[in-house]
């Protein structure tokens, strides 16, 4: 085992607890000597020995080499090492009184201008625009550093202006005041004083103009829901464009909301006149951001770390706050005066540093505090609608959830980790980058996006209700209340409401329930009144029914009398004027169906006679048919077809072409052709004009029961007891076609082949 190692106390701190775990691993591996372990790794005996001495945390590389020599699990020990490193870093922050040179996610303030590097050229451009234009728009994507540029770049330069600067048509002097604001939910009401020039209109005090700096200008569109208030704020702000107004305005808007500025005509014109677009920082500017704050604090950043950070952040949207945060975490874990690349890896890199910090803070909260932290953070976010999610500053009063001590403790924890910022009365996210960089927070927002929108609307409505001294007219009703009730019905939703919101929702529900109860009472009264009216209506109806029945009886007696009189007149005229008699008999029956009217009708009917009786068949007649020109054809059991002149009741011709009972006859639409069919399984086609047989159509295996021509007369069909319908072309020069339908039974393929001669059909359709 070699020399005896100094005893360790796992409770003495994270370093000794980690070293104790390493020694235990070595013991469980059989206690190999450090010399034997050194032969398996690229490290010396002394380096491995110091790793388990407990004096300091070994590097990750040395730790993994030690673990590999003892047969330990690499991933498990890497996780253990990172947790211990986090614990040591947090302890160092609590014990370290030194001012960090980096801001982390927090923005730079005017007092931080001496540590604000890498934006000199942009600050010069912005100051030049402010001196030459009365309304300036600063546009950049989230994470480009707009807020810091305004606060730590522009404002100190404006306040430090010493000599007048000749602008376009008018001199520029030191501002009488520089005011910075964020619009919030009620910009016109909240910032009325801030938009008033120092000393009144036109700067009457002679101290120069007032410069109003509006940060997070997109809140005009995301938080302000009242179009009238939004317009009032914009109109007052745009008044700075007028010479003599005593104001100059600088607004910073996120790039994805820049298009909203076109919705206001004068604002669109102002954006066209003087807009400064912030792009990504150049590599030399990023180098200044990384190196110069450390140099000012007497620290050194390894060149390899600087080069790696520039490569990872250059051109990365929103990468600047993440860079600042990872540098802050590297500073907290520094060893001596150097910020090393190994430390950068330990904190998880640019993307992982924010998530690691946030997760560590969240993991150290009690379950109750963790739930409270979730509610706090979600309150600081406005879910985007077709745009990125945005942060939302709130008053401390909005975070009233019961015990103020718990809320204060959670806010302090989040603020110490620089995840949020605390002003005198305002709580805000340190940066919107936290929303995308922390997976847990991003997941909360995605999970509750629709509910968050409903909650934000409820918050605004409750605040307006409170400002109107709880006016009943400001309460929720109808659909909005139904949506809020559904939202509040889910588990834990009521716990997310503060005192004002809860009172607002309860008052809205109480008002609706009261209105429903009043409506129910009115409905009951109306029902009672309706019942009384119904009784009265029944009485009146009964009286009316008696009167109607009496009148109906009188009318019916009159109708019977008229019917009888008409029937008598019809019988008197039956011989002399039969047509008139028939009309009178019909009218008598329509007036009233009396026995006299029925008798008159029967008498009229009995006098009607048939025109003629045609005889020409020796047996039963089966079927008759008329041609378009009025020629009548009849067929019968004697196998004959007789043609008749129906008008003169004379026989024209007797056609014989069948030897057995004929059952079907039909004329073509033009009357030129006639088809007959019978028990001899044939269909005979006739030329009517010449009384001659045109063709005999065969193929049926049973008696033909009916024949019919197609509307164009080019096809004749026959149906038979054999279960088929056959179609033939009436033109003998064309090949006949056949349509077979298994109507009565299923036929085998061989039966079909026997049934249909190969040369007599054009197409066969199996309908079975």
Image (tube, rainbow, N blue to C red):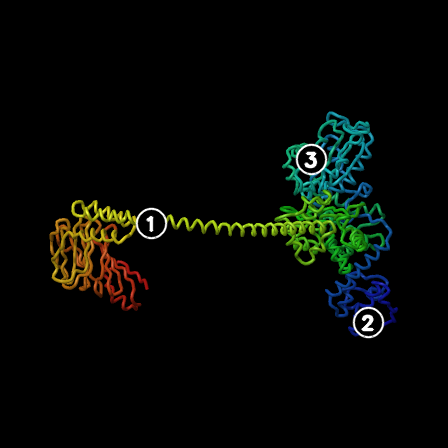
Who comes first in sequence, dot 2 or dot 3? 2
Q: In the rendering, at what x and y percent does residue 221 appear?
A: 67, 41
The answer, for residue 329, to whether it is visible in the render is: no
Q: In the image, which disc is placed on residue 299?
A: none
The answer, for residue 564, to whether it is visible in the render is: yes
Who comes first in sequence, dot 1 or dot 2? 2
- Number of numbered tags placed on the structure image: 3
Disc 2 versus disc 3: distance between alpha carbons?
A: 80 Å
Query: Is residue 208 rendered to the left or right of residue 241?
Result: right
Q: Secondary structure at mark 2?
A: loop
Residue beneath disc 1: 556
Which quarter shows the N terminus?
Answer: bottom right
Disc 1 versus disc 3: distance between alpha carbons?
A: 81 Å
Q: In the rendering, at what x and y percent does residue 161 appear?
A: 81, 32
User: In front: 42, or 234?
Assistant: 234
Q: Secondary structure at mark 1?
A: helix
Q: Nearer the viewer, mark 1 or mark 2?
A: 1
Would you identify the image quadrant in which residue 71 lies?
bottom right
Residue beneath disc 3: 232
User: In front: 350, or 49?
Assistant: 350
Residue beneath disc 2: 33
Name which residue lies at 56% across and 52% down: 527
Q: Is residue 486 above or below residue 168?
A: below
Q: Nearer the viewer, mark 2 or mark 3?
A: 3
């Amino acid at each position: 085992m070699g020399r005896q190692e100094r005893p360790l106390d796992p409770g003495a701190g994270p370093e000794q607890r980690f070293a104790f775990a390493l020694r235990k691993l070595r013991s469980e591996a059989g206690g190999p000597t450090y010399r034997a372990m050194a032969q398996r790794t690229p490290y010396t005996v002394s380096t491995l020995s110091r790793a388990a001495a407990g004096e300091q945390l070994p590097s990750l590389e040395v730790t993994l080499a030690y673990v590999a020599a003892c047969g330990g699990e690499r991933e498990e020990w890497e996780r253990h090492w990172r947790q211990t490193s986090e614990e040591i870093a947090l302890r160092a922050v609590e014990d370290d009184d030194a001012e960090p040179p980096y801001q982390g996610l927090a923005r730079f303030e005017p007092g931080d201008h001496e540590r604000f590097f890498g934006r000199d050229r942009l600050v010069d451009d912005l100051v030049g625009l402010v001196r030459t234009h009365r309304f300036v728009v600063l546009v950049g994507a989230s994470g480009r550093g707009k807020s810091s540029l305004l606060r730590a770049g522009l404002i100190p330069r404006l306040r430090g202006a010493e000599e007048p600067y000749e602008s376009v048509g008018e001199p520029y002097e030191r501002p009488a005041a520089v005011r910075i604001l964020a619009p919030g939910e009620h910009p016109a009401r909240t910032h009325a004083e801030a938009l008033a020039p120092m000393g009144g209109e036109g700067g009457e005090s002679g101290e120069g103009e007032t410069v109003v700096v509006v940060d997070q200008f997109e809140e005009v569109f995301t938080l302000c829901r009242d179009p009238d208030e939004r317009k009032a704020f914009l109109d007052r702000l745009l008044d700075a464009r007028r010479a003599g107004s005593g104001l100059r305005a600088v607004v910073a808007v996120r790039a994805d909301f820049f298009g909203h500025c076109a919705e206001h005509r004068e604002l669109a014109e102002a954006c066209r006149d003087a807009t400064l677009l912030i792009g990504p920082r150049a590599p030399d500017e990023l180098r200044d951001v990384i190196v110069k704050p450390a140099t000012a604090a007497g620290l050194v950043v390894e060149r390899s770390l600087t080069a790696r950070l520039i490569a990872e952040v250059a051109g990365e949207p929103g990468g600047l706050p993440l860079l600042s945060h990872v540098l802050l975490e590297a500073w907290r874990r520094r060893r001596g005066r150097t910020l090393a690349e190994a430390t950068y890896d330990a904190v998880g890199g640019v993307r992982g540093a924010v998530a690691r910090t946030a997760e560590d803070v969240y993991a150290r909260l009690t379950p109750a505090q963790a739930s409270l932290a979730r509610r706090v953070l979600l309150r600081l976010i406005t879910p985007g609608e077709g745009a990125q999610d945005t942060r939302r500053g709130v008053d401390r009063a909005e975070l009233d959830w019961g015990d103020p001590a718990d809320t204060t403790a959670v806010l302090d924890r989040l603020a110490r980790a620089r995840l949020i910022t605390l002003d005198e009365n305002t709580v805000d996210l340190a940066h919107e980058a936290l929303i995308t960089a922390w997976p847990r927070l991003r997941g909360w927002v995605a999970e509750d996006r629709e509910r968050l929108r409903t909650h934000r609307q409820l918050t605004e409505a409750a605040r307006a209700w409170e400002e109107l001294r709880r006016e009943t007219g400001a309460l929720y009703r109808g659909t909005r209340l139904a949506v809020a009730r559904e939202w509040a019905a889910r588990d834990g939703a009521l716990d997310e409401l503060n005192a004002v919101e809860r009172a607002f929702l309860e008052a809205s529900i109480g008002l609706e329930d009261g209105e429903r109860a009043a409506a129910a009472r009115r409905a009951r009264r109306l029902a009672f009144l309706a019942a009384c009216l119904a009784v009265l209506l029944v009485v009146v109806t009964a009286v009316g029914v008696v009167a109607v029945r009496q009148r109906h009886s009188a009318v019916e007696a009159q109708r019977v009398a008229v019917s009888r009189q008409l029937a008598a007149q019809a019988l008197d005229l039956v011989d002399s004027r039969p047509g008139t008699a028939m009309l009178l008999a019909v009218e008598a029956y329509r007036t009233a169906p009396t026995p006299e009217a029925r008798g008159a009708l029967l008498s009229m009917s009995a006098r009607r006679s048939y025109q003629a009786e045609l005889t020409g068949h020796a047996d039963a007649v089966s079927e008759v048919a008329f041609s378009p020109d009025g020629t009548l054809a009849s067929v019968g059991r004697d196998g004959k077809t007789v043609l008749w002149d129906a008008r003169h009741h004379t026989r024209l011709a007797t056609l014989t072409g069948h030897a057995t009972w004929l059952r079907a006859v039909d004329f073509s639409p033009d009357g030129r052709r006639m088809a007959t069919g019978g028990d001899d399984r044939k269909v005979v086609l006739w030329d009517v004009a010449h009384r001659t047989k045109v063709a005999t159509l065969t193929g049926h295996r049973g008696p033909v029961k009916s024949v019919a021509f197609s509307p164009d007369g080019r096809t004749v069909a026959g149906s038979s007891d054999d279960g088929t319908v056959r179609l033939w072309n009436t033109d003998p020069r064309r090949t006949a076609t056949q349509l077979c339908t298994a109507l009565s039974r299923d036929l085998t393929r061989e039966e079909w082949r026997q049934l249909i001669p190969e040369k007599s059909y054009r197409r066969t359709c199996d309908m079975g």
